[in-house]
Image (cartoon, helix red, strand yellow):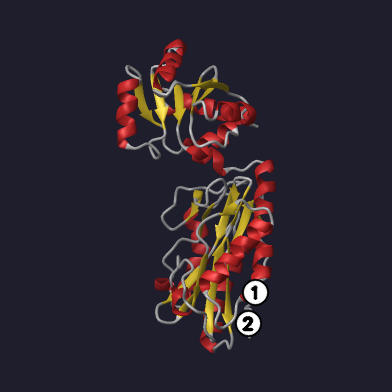
């Protein structure tokens, strides 16, 4: 697996104007090598790949990694070893992760790796990561299954008088009980007027009657994320609750029925946005339709009005999550995880989407 990923990256080097690439970000290092430690860099050249780490992780890196030569670097850092390897390969142009490297780190590279020329790599690894392999899809499906089971479990805890923070804690505990090592992000439990906050992480607010409750959460499982949102009503449900919910559900179902590879990110976004706008709520839908998930909770591709050049491909795993948010009243978001197939999509999350009213 690692060998194939390194080979793909190596095939990109020349087109990006580099002789080698230095990978410093944790997620890209893990993607290329399988190493889950928190310290180390990977150098990929035309003829080989090396993982440099310190004495704390040498044994772990050797056990976990494949396709790379593991080398322990001294306490002074890995720079001299990388520079020596580049000289031995005759590599004069080094690609680096410009979106993940601070200016201070760049300045250090420039000084310690001289006379090599530093060339920004863009998001080449993020683009490669976006197309998931079968082994990755299997793990993401398991993470999605944990989220689905958690939603079914938590319905019995949502009632007037319950605290958002207590609901979130129960969800997080249950996901861990099912095998998750953590959450994909801070769990969102937003009730009443707070449900109009798209990222309203759980607070000490007490849930009342006649309110929306939005649950946005995910399981972090074997290094991969899931991301599920459902909105329920703690009864009774008013006509306005039903109207807003019905519009969001119509938009989400339309996107799921029509999303397919070959679409641009902007075209995919329009599948939900056009419907919500037609009902007069376009200004209350301020975020994009979706985003990629995988090793990270937000990665390529983007289903967004600002992504006209993004083309969806088979193997992309994305969220579809339209919403309407009305300050002073509340909001609705419905979200599923899907994988693009050769001719459409496969839906990974299966929690019910008809309006659930909890009495």
Among the two numbered marks 2 and 1 on one chain, the one whose residue lies closer to the N terminus: 1
Residue in the foreground of this view, choosing between 65 and 260? 65
Report if residue 251 is visible in the image: no
Quarter of the image with the C terminus in it = bottom right
**How packed is label 2: few (under 14 Cα within 10 Å), some, or many (20 or more)?**
some
Residue at 65% x, 64% y is 150
State the image quarter where residue 355 is shown: bottom right
State the image quarter where residue 170 is shown: bottom right
Label 2, label 1: how many angstroms apart (C-alpha)? 8 Å
266 is higher (above) or lower (below) than 28: below
Residue at 39% x, 72% y is 283
Q: Is residue 81 left or right of residue 260?
A: left
Instruction: Tell me where residue 35 appears, x and y as whole percent.
Output: 58, 33
Instruction: Tell me where residue 16 appears, x and y as whole percent.
Output: 43, 28
Contact (Cβ within 8 Å) of mark 2 with mark 1: yes
Report if residue 260 is visible in the image: yes
Residue in the foreground of this view, choosing between 90 and 310? 90
Residue in the foreground of this view, choosing between 66 and 123? 66
Q: Which mark is residue 358?
A: 2
Quarter of the image with the N terminus in it = top right
Instruction: Tell me where residue 48 appears, x and y as whole percent.
Output: 55, 19
Residue at 52% x, 84% y is 208
Q: Secondary structure at mark 2?
A: strand
Instruction: Tell me where residue 119 appears, x and y as whole percent.
Output: 37, 28
Q: Which residue is mark 1?
A: 155
């Amino acid at each position: 697996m690692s060998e194939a990923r390194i080979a793909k990256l190596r095939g990109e080097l020349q087109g990006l104007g580099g002789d080698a690439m230095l990978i410093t970000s944790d997620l890209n290092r893990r993607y290329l090598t399988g190493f889950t430690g928190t310290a180390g860099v990977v150098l990929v050249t035309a003829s080989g790949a090396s993982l440099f780490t310190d004495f704390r992780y040498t044994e772990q890196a050797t056990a976990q990694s494949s396709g790379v030569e593991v080398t322990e670097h001294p306490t002074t850092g890995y720079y001299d070893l990388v520079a020596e390897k580049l000289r031995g390969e005759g590599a004069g142009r080094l690609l680096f992760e410009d979106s993940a490297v601070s200016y201070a780190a760049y300045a250090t590279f420039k000084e310690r790796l001289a006379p090599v020329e530093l060339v920004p790599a863009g998001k080449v690894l993020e683009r490669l990561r976006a197309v998931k392999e079968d082994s990755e899809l299997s793990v993401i499906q398991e993470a999605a299954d944990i989220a689905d089971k958690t939603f079914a479990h938590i319905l019995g805890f949502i009632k007037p008088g319950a605290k958002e923070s207590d609901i979130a804690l129960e969800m997080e505990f249950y996901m861990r009980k099912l095998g998750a090592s953590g959450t994909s992000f801070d769990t969102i439990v937003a009730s009443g007027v707070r449900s109009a906050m798209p990222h309203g992480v759980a607070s000490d607010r007490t849930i009342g009657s006649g309110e929306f409750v939005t649950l946005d959460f995910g399981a972090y499982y074997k290094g991969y994320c899931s991301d599920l949102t459902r909105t329920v009503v703690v009864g009774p449900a008013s006509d306005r609750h039903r109207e807003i919910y019905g519009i969001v559900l119509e938009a989400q179902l339309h996107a799921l029925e029509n999303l397919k590879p070959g679409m641009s990110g902007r075209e995919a976004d329009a599948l939900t946005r056009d419907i919500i706008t037609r009902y007069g709520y376009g200004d209350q839908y301020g975020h994009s339709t979706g985003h990629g998930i995988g090793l990270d909770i937000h990665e390529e591709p983007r289903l967004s009005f600002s992504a006209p050049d993004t083309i969806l491909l088979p193997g992309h795993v994305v969220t579809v999550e339209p919403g309407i948010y009305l300050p002073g009243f509340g909001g609705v978001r419905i979200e599923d995880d899907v994988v693009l197939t050769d001719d459409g999509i496969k839906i990974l999350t299966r929690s019910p989407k008809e309006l659930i009213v909890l009495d």
